[in-house]
Image: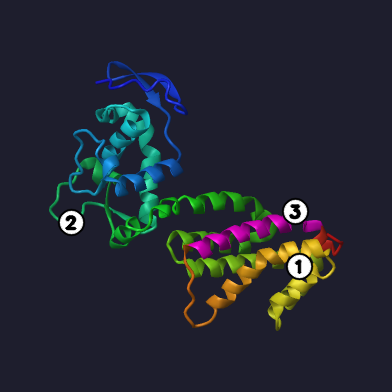
Amino acid sequence: MGGLSARGVPGVHWSEEMTSGHSLPGPEAPSLEDALLFIVKYLRDPETRRHTGGWVDYGYELYVPKVLAAYCHVTYRRDPSFSADEMVARALAPPFLDAAWELCRRGILRPGIKTLNLQATSDGSAGAGFSITPFGRVWLNEPEHETFVPTEPERFAKLLEPYRERFGSGFHERAQQALRCYGAHAYLASCAMCGAAAESIMLAAATAKVGEEKATKLYAGANGRFRIEKLLTGQLSDRLRRELQSSTSLLKYWRDASAHGRAVAIDDNEAFTSIALLLRFAASVDENWASLTSGGAG
């Protein structure tokens, strides 16, 4: 059962493999991001779920072999039964299994059948069968732009990773917490952690400038954050000072707002902006490290 040929599809790379007695092209596995986006689309869009041939869900709400059938049809214009080929399924499955587990980690899916006494399969029990959580149902019904939320933290994580060595483990820990909170829709907590990560950046720069003991003493004292900021920017050019302050003003506001008991209306837009500002601040400090740590003009 060879289905339709996928040769000539833009962006698709194929290797010549002999599978199941047929000369079938073997597709390269998609990235984790692509697999995750497709699963979210599959869960939200009945039209996408329609392209699954004769595959059934059994007792699951997300059965990875069925998702693979839909993916082969939508992406490569293959007959849905093409994914039944064992070699092809093995090539495609890992990122989809990883993506399904990532959605479990974020509380959108959970492993297993939907409820008791439904039909399970050996593949499903081994990690290919999932059901939607109550939180997941709410999340999947949110506006369409939310489709991209799961992938953004991974992109930001990759962009922030190069600064780990310069700014230290405190920065890395808080930045990762900000990304995890964002992925879990804990937007206020995400903003708070972005502010904390920005302070870690300033503390790292102050330590490089005056030493750990003096920097820690300044930071721990009254108005510590303000004194650290003044230490670092007091002798900079107006241009560079404004550049750094523009990156930190909202971060400081959201960090302070989270420390008080009153309600704060922070949604995904503010949290996303907060992470973007943290990235810009990290890049700016890294670029101007010599000026900040030596006191020279920017």
Q: Is residue 72 left or right of residue 233?
A: left
Q: Residue at x 72, y 59 (%)?
A: 285
Residue 211, given in percent of the width and then of the height, sits at 79, 68
What's the distance in space between the residues labelled 2 and 1, CA to CA? 56 Å
Residue at which label 3 appears: 287
**What crowding class fits label 2: few (fewer than 14 Cα within 10 Å), some (14-19), or many (20 or more)?**
few
Give the residue type at disc 2: Thr
Give the residue type at disc 3: Glu
18 is higher (above) or lower (below) than 75: above
Residue 59, given in percent of the width and then of the height, sits at 18, 48
What's the distance in space between the residues labelled 1 and 3, CA to CA? 15 Å
Is residue 284 shown in magenta?
yes
Is residue 216 shown in magenta?
no
Residue 174, given in percent of the width and then of the height, sits at 57, 64
Sequence-first disc among 1 and 3: 1
Give the residue type at disc 1: Ala
Q: Secondary structure at mark 2?
A: loop
Residue at which label 1 appears: 206
Magenta region: 269-290
Sequence-first disc among 2 and 3: 2
Residue at which label 2 appears: 115
37 is higher (above) or lower (below) than 200: above
Sequence-first disc among 2 and 1: 2
**What crowding class fits label 1: few (fewer than 14 Cα within 10 Å), some (14-19), or many (20 or more)?**
many
Q: Secondary structure at mark 3?
A: helix
Tell me the quadrant of the picture where the N terminus can be found: top left
Q: Residue at x 28, y 20 (%)?
A: 2
Residue 192, given in percent of the width and then of the height, sits at 55, 70
Residue 108 visible to an observer of this rendering: no
What's the distance in space between the residues labelled 2 and 3, CA to CA? 54 Å
Q: Residue at x 34, y 32 (%)?
A: 90
